[in-house]
Image: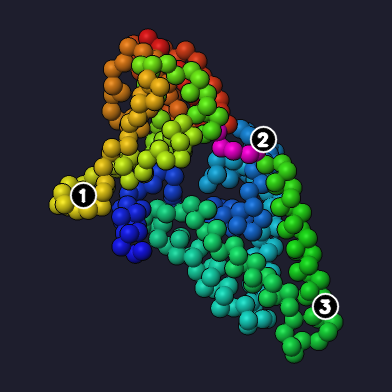
Amino acid sequence: MAVAALPAVVFALMHRAAHTHSPDLREIAQTWSFLTFGDMGSACADISPADNCTELLPFGGTGPTWVLALAALLFGALLVLAIYDKRTRLPLATLVFAPLILGVVISQFKTMWLPRVFLPIVPFICLIVAVGATAPDKQSGAQGGLRTSAFMLLAVVWAGLGMFQQFTRQKGDGFKPAAEFVRTIAKPGDLVLVDDNFHYWCFNWYYMGANWGDPRHAFLPDPEWARLLRRLPASITTLLDLNNSDSSFVSGGATVELWDRKRIPPESAADVIVVRDQATRQPNFPNRHLASTTHMKQLLVERWTQ
């Protein structure tokens, strides 16, 4: 299994991801809030943050400030619990805090911070809370009852917020409706340009199907990655099965292509359809004008005609 996973591991280590970054203290706090009380972005406006919300950068959405306060309260409670209950000290330090600390340290040298990377520590947080809710044998009955009541209250709050999020959060991320919309407007000969690796992979999942291809065969090499491949023997690239064979498809007569903004798109007498994130810069195609723009949640679908 280790040998079979080696190509994917090497790809992940050496190919820089554009959506990861090096966090500051604010983003660390927001990540902890996400891990403990979930993504409350649906409680605020989709585009502009509401007055009582702060921007949650890792997700491109927003979250209410009171959730950050709850997360800080839980953080303090876990620290107090670790001080007075030695059963929770080692698990809290090694299974919860250590991955976050290592993520911060590693991101100072090679960006890897992405809140969802740390989701595996959530079960450990729950287990530590469960251990904390049970009183040690030597603790008196009154203190044990108070401890259990406090953690039962936390469980009720957690369950209530979880149900609230499920009923109010915006479902989907825009890729499925964008793919369906492009399928209806794309004509034979049209060129569909999808901006950056991540959006291309997600878009094709719905446009071409779940078996559209392999990310190892469709990526834009950054300078560091390209420089490394030039130094390695060609046999290594073949061994790792790295190529760009899945960077372009023809479906229904229209060509879907992973778009490298640094290169001029191929000439086409037909229209150019661009799928990109709303936060990215609008392209400029010589001899073409923007005919239409359609918003699909965080995505934009633009049609450019001659």
Q: Which mark is residue 238?
A: 1
Q: Which of marks 2 and 3 is nearer the N terminus?
A: 2
Magenta extent: 170-174
Q: Earlier in the sequence, mark 1 or mark 3?
A: 3
Q: Is residue 137 visible?
A: yes
Residue that numbered label 2 is attached to:
45
The relative height of residue 113 versus residue 198 in the rendered view (above or below) is: below
- The answer to whether the residue labelled 1 contacts the one labelled 2, judged by CB atoms less than 8 Å apart, is no
Amino acid type, callout 1: Thr
Between the C-alphas of marks 1 and 3, the distance is 63 Å
Residue that numbered label 3 is attached to:
145
Instruction: Give whichever of 72, 46 is nearer the camera.
Output: 46
Q: Where is residue 271 in the image (x, y as percent from the top left)?
A: 39, 15
The relative height of residue 259 versus residue 190 in the rendered view (above or below) is: below
Q: Mark 1 or mark 3, which is nearer to you?
A: 1
Q: Which of marks 1 and 2 is nearer the N terminus?
A: 2
Q: In this view, does 254 lie to the left or right of 86?
A: left
Q: Position of residue 288 (x, y in %)?
A: 37, 12
Q: Is residue 1 left or right of residue 163?
A: left
The residue that appears at 61% across and 53% down in the rendered structure is: 34
- The answer to whether the residue labelled 2 contacts the one labelled 3, judged by CB atoms less than 8 Å apart, is no
Callout 3 secondary element:
helix
The residue that appears at 56% across and 37% down in the rendered structure is: 173
The residue that appears at 40% across and 53% down in the rendered structure is: 111
